[in-house]
Amino acid sequence: MSPNLILVLLISPLVGFLINGLFGKWLKGNEKLSGGIGALAVLVSLICSISAFISVKNGNPLEGDAGHLYSWIVSGAFIAGGPFEVNIGFHVDALTTVMLLVITGVGFLIHVYSIGYMHGDEGYTRYFAYLNLFVFAMLILVLGNNYLMMFVGWEGVGLCSYLLIGFWYEKQSATDAGKKAFIVNRIGDFGFLLGMFTLFAAFGSLDFVSIFDKAEAGTIEIVFGETTKATLMVATLLLFVGAIGKSAQLPLYVWLPDAMEGPTPVSALIHAATMVTAGVYMIARSAILYNLAETGAVVAWIGVLTALFAAIIALKQNDIKRILAYSTVSQLGYMFVGVGVGAYASGIFHLVTHAFFKGLMFLTAGSVMHAMANELDIRKMGGLRNKLPITHATFLVGALAIAGAPFLSGFWSKDEILHSAWDSFPFIYIIGLVTAFLTAFYMFRLIFVTFYGESRVEPEVASHLHESPAVMWLPLAILAVPSALIGLLLGVGGHNSWFHHFTEDVFPKAHEASGSVLLFMAISSVVGIAGIAYAWKRYKDRAPSAEPTNTLQKVVANKFYVDEVYNTFIVQPIKGASHFLLWKLFDSGIIDGIVNGVAALIRVIGGMLRRLQTGIVQAYIVSMVIGIVLFLAYYLFFT
Amino acid sequence: MLIDYLPIVFLGVFAVLFAAVNLSLTHLLGPKKPTRVKLSVYESGVQPVGDARQRFSIRFDLIAMLFIIFDIEVVFLYPWAVVFKTFAENEGSGLFILIEMLVFIGILLLGYIYAWRKGGLTWD
Amino acid sequence: MPLEIPDINWSLLMPQLVIVSTLLIVLVFDMFDAISKKTLGWMTIVGAGIALWSSIDLLQAGTDQTQFNEMFRIDSYSLFFNIIFLVSTILVALVSISYLGSGDKKQGPYYLLILLATLGMMLMAAGNELIIVFLGLELMSLSLYVLASYFRESPASSEAGMKYLLLGAFASAFFLYGIALVYGAAGTTNIPEIISKLSVGDQLSLLSESPLFLAGIFLLIVGFGFKVAIVPFHQWAPDVYEGAPTTIAAFISAGPKAAGFAAFLTIFVDALPKLPTQATGVIVLLAMLTMTVGNVIAIAQTNIKRMLAYSSIAHAGYVMIGLAAANPDGKSSAMLYLFIYCVMNIGAFGVVIMARTADGENLMISDYAGLGFRKPLLAMFMTLMLLSLAGFPPTAGFVGKLYVFKSAVEARHYWLVIFGAINTAISAFYYLRVVVTMYMREPEEELEFKPYPPTLVIGLVLAAIGILLIGILPSLLLDQAQSAVQSALL
């Protein structure tokens, strides 16, 4: 595979961004063209991705020196540690191509869908510019052959996410949500940055290949603690902090539900299928480091607790997008369990299936909103099955997939993860199983309340109810196919499945999970079906009650008051401290004193020096001569 | 090393002192009997008329500058003419330095025409 | 002494010859009133373009020769600087074509003088001899004096030209005096010879301590210091930039500064290690003073042209860091920095021209309020140029600063680097203030902007592409600069 292919793949969305970004004024009148350019840019990337995939499949990856493009900064001995080099290059192996196909495949469909969904919006071209920029940043993230490029992409997707969450910036809640996402992510990014510094201190490089080689050979500078393992533990945990932020895990998940303020296709692409899975990708990419540091247990535990916690919250939500958002948080938790217990391929497999079915469900949710004049409350829906047949059918496929209904995609991937967890962490397995039950339950609660039973749609909305246009439902139909079948195609056979074979060169060998695969599958199926059945029993013909009836329900409905707790114990104290301590005392008093003092001093000096600039030539000559005399005196006499 | 320059410093100091002493002595000792005629401006015996601080037309400078440029051209021609014969006879490169000088004159001629056309030579 | 005709290889002189021919063609065509004056601008661009192409060609051929009895160097060092000058000239000409309009009858000399100044700069960079350097310096300076006062109806422009002439002549006198003293002490004006005379074997020679020689060197520093506007010889710069036509301000701040440094670096990077330590001390002090004074006064400015003037003073200080390092890395990084600086500074002045209204230019920073949304293209260019001037990645400005600082670290001038870093922080303040004004302040009055002239937009697009390209792919340029320095070493 030649790097040129990857360059085309990478540059295409950038070109799309530039066209829509720079010539937006001229494209504004022509939505089809603007959206078409956006979608076409991603289509080109998709075609290149398929080509790259075939190359890798034929045993021809782009790794090491072959992927090296050029050195951005080369320095002999900038720092004491040795030569400092920042390289730009690509690393395309099985893991990368899987990510590429997900990003460009799902991305392309979502671009197409957006052409219809964003119809008539003020910021139509701006939207496609941002979306293309996002794809570009995400591609940098997965294509880079070093942590710095990954970080550039990491920040880039963060920026795009911020811009797109606050896309409707006239809305206060949207800008607030954008800011929240940005600030919470900063905490994680700071961890990632520190992790990168640690890696650089330990390895003297940020390139994947050289880091992994050195890590396996054990030639590591000890930066923290006594042993190389301690250093690696610090580095991997710091990197994991970054993943917690970006992939919305406990305790930094709070930004993701609020991110639903953005346009729905954005939620589907960024906050379900691609960006939020960057953390999982990062850990899978660093698999060797996590194995050596043995920090996977932390990852797995955080993941499973997040999965359970988010699933519980989802039980009592009534906002269709928020239910999906919590479900995303929960499913991301599963992925972290997968990569945490060392079953990297399973974790990534779940990432893939999740991208399809969760992207699908977000888009169907968008289709519902489109039909319902942007109504989000499922209590005001009901009986939509007849009015929106395609939407209903595709949503059902997605929900069955996530609930783990036998033979659909989610069934295979989730089962693999749970099975892998069983041996080393039986508790995680049990919590995961409980979560699977809850997942099936809340997802079908959503389905039954929305699509079945009596219609509770307000009359004026009901009169306009219509199925979405083809440009919207066609992507739904296309996405429904892999959501249903991809597991059958790639996942059958557990550790001997096609997907595991494809990625076996990338990941360290996972131990074979013990026990009968069929038994585990049977347990999972029973749990999933039980969840669906229980939801059917409770919600087949009634809406959720308007008010929670007991304290426990109230706590859950209010999302365990996490936002309130954060607000009371972190945000307000920080604001308070910043107001009184930092702003009033420290800032106004000391820092302002210093800064203003310095600024005032500089300004006074500037003012004084400016006064030397009289505009009179004689004065200039005098000051020049004074300068000359002083320097001459120094030059000749201070030897 | 700076001690080497001491004589120059002495010379400077002596020169300044000499001038200052002489000027102040004549100022102090000399008799002063000013009359109207003595204080008037001396212009070679002609009666002074008007203010000496007049503005000259900028064209004087312009013509003077153009004159100097072409004057220098001629100055360049002299040494060239002196060595031309030697080169033509001994080195056989007479044609080359002839062309060189023609190019030089040509460029200046071009400048001359330019100045002419742009009105650099007209007084008004 | 028998006279000899030097063996001249004309093909090596292509860049200079092309410029001279272009100059003559422009001169001839300027005599005919029927020829549109814009055509002259395009001729300048084409001529400079051909010269640029032949410079690159010679550079890639690895030319390394001297001509005219070793007075004139055609090596990768001078060719690299040729590229800087010619790129600056092309950009300035592109910006000028629409700036001057086609109505002005007196436009011919404008392009003539720009070409003459460019020729002077090329001489300075190619000078292997102090006399040639001086010749180039004067050719360049005299053209610039006239250009600065080009708007004869404007008192500010006339004043700028007059001040520049008076102070420039003063500084030239110092420079010439310096040459005389150096010649007196060393007995030659050939630069490599002077440098080789500074040491005998591994030992420093008596010449390196001779007061006459040191005084001469100091006066050369003063002369160059004036031309590249370093503190305390900088005071002409803000007045001249403010009064001169904006295109000329862009030109003076770019090419001539690079030319001054071209000669400055030739002499001093090799000479400094062989001079007493206080010579380096003077350079270090000048660098610190220049950066600090430039940046600090820039904060107090409300006029964008003056702000850019002080910022260009500060940038001369950053280049001085590379000079003070006095090692091959310092030289190549200073060259890289100069190239980047020229492109981004002309770009910034270009945006100032872009923001013209019917009443003339809007030079107050407060006039830029709210432009971020009303004039997205203009604001985008300005933001890019300012970010690059401030040194943010992934713009070229970052790369330039990084390598300059790096070279000083290698030379163990830690304090200088710390000073540079602090100054970068100070400079970010006033650069970003303009960006903040553009995007976050409401305009006080609605300004009606003139439509953007196409040539100006072309020039700015080229500058923007250059800045991003160098920022992302610095090796394109850095390798050239480094190999230029390497070849000079061999």
Image: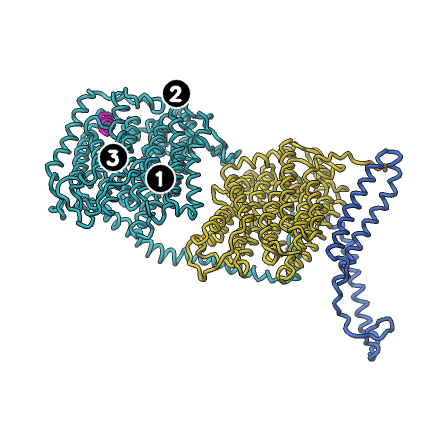
Chain colours: A cyan, B blue, C yellow
Mark 3 chain: A
Which residue occupies the foreground of this view, C62 or A378? A378
Residue A637 percent across, percent down from the top left: 66, 50
Q: Earlier in the sequence, mark 1 or mark 3?
A: 1
**Three-letter code, disc 3:** Gln
**Image: magenta residue range:** A410-419
N-terminal of the pair, mark 2 or mark 1, is: 2
Q: Residue at x 39, y 20 (%)?
A: A58
Whether A79 is drawn above or below A167: the answer is above
Which sits earlier in the primary sequence, circle 2 or circle 3?
Answer: 2
Q: Which numbered circle lies on residue C487?
A: none
Q: Which mark is residue A191?
A: 1
Q: Quadrant of the C terminus of chain C?
A: top right
- Image quadrant containing the N terminus of chain C: top right
Give the distance between the C-alpha atoms of the residues marked 2 and 1, in whole angstroms.
38 Å
Query: Which subunit holds the residue at mark 1?
Result: A
x%, y% of residue A492? 25, 22
Residue A517 seen: yes
Where is mark 2, residue-wise?
Answer: A58
The residue lying toward the viewer, choosing from C301 and A178, is: A178
User: Circle 3 — which element?
Assistant: helix
Residue at 80% x, 52% y is B70
Residue C20 in magenta? no
Q: Secondary structure at mark 1?
A: helix
Q: Determine the image quadrant of residue B23.
A: bottom right
Magenta stretch: includes residue A418 = yes
Describe residue A358's horizontal placement relative to residue B26 as left or right.
left
Q: Amino acid at mark 2?
A: Asn
Question: Comparing marks 2 and 1, which lies closer to the viewer?
Answer: 2
* Residue underneath mark 3: A331
Dot 2 lies on which element? loop
